[in-house]
Image (cartoon, rainbow, N blue to C red):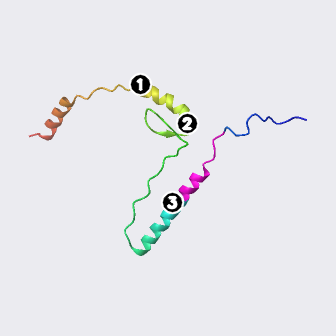
Amino acid sequence: VTKKSEANPISTEKTSSWRRKHEDFIQSIRAAKDVNHLLKSGGPLPPPPPSKPNPDYVQCPYCQRRFESFTAERHIPFCKEKASRLIHKPSSGNKALESLNKRVHYK
C-alpha cells in the first residue's frame, strides 16, 4: 500500500481569483443596466467605466506592457535587447526648428 505524499497540502499553483472576476462582472452588468435605463429615459450617458489591468499579468520594465507569465518570459529578454540596441540621440532641436521655419515661412 502506497501513501500519497503529504509534503504540502497547499497547492503551489496560482490561487483562483474568481471573487474579483465575479465582482468585476457584476459591476459591468450594473453599468450596462444603468446605460439601458438612461437610453430609455433619454438622459445623458455616463462615461464608460475604466478598464482595470489584469493583476495576474507581468509588466515589462522596458515598454510597460503587460503579459501573461509565460509570454513575459519570452518578451522581456527580447525587449531588453531591443532597448539596448536603440540609440537615444539628443534631438538637434535648432536644426529641426530652422528647417520647419523655412517650410512654414516659404515666400
Q: Residues within 10 Å of mark 1 (few under 14, many from 20)?
A: few
**Where is residue 28 shown, x and y percent of the image?**
51, 60
- Mark 1 vs mark 2, CA separation in Å: 20 Å
Compare marks 3 and 2 and give the one earlier in the sequence: 3
Quadrant of residue 103 within the rendered picture = top left
Of tags 3 and 2, the one toward the viewer is: 3
The picture places residue 78, in percent across and down from the top left corner, at 49, 29
Q: Is residue 19 magenta?
A: yes
User: How far across and down, in percent of the image, does residue 69 sit?
Assistant: 57, 37
Report helix, strand or loop for mark 1. helix
Amino acid under disc 1: Ser
Q: Which residue is mark 2?
A: 71
Task: Tell which circle, 1 or 3, labels the residue nearer the N-terminal end.
Answer: 3
Q: Which residue is mark 3?
A: 28
Q: Secondary structure at mark 3?
A: helix
Amino acid type for the residue under numbered disc 3 = Ser
Q: Which residue is mark 1?
A: 84
Left/right of residue 33 with respect to residue 101 in the rendered view: right
Residue 72 at what x, y percent from top left? 53, 35
Drawn side of residue 33 relative to residue 97, left or right: right
**Type of amino acid under label 2:** Thr
Rounded to the nearest angstrom, the CA distance separating label 3 from label 2 is: 28 Å
Using the image, determine if residue 93 lies above or below residue 30: above
The magenta-colored residue range is 13-25
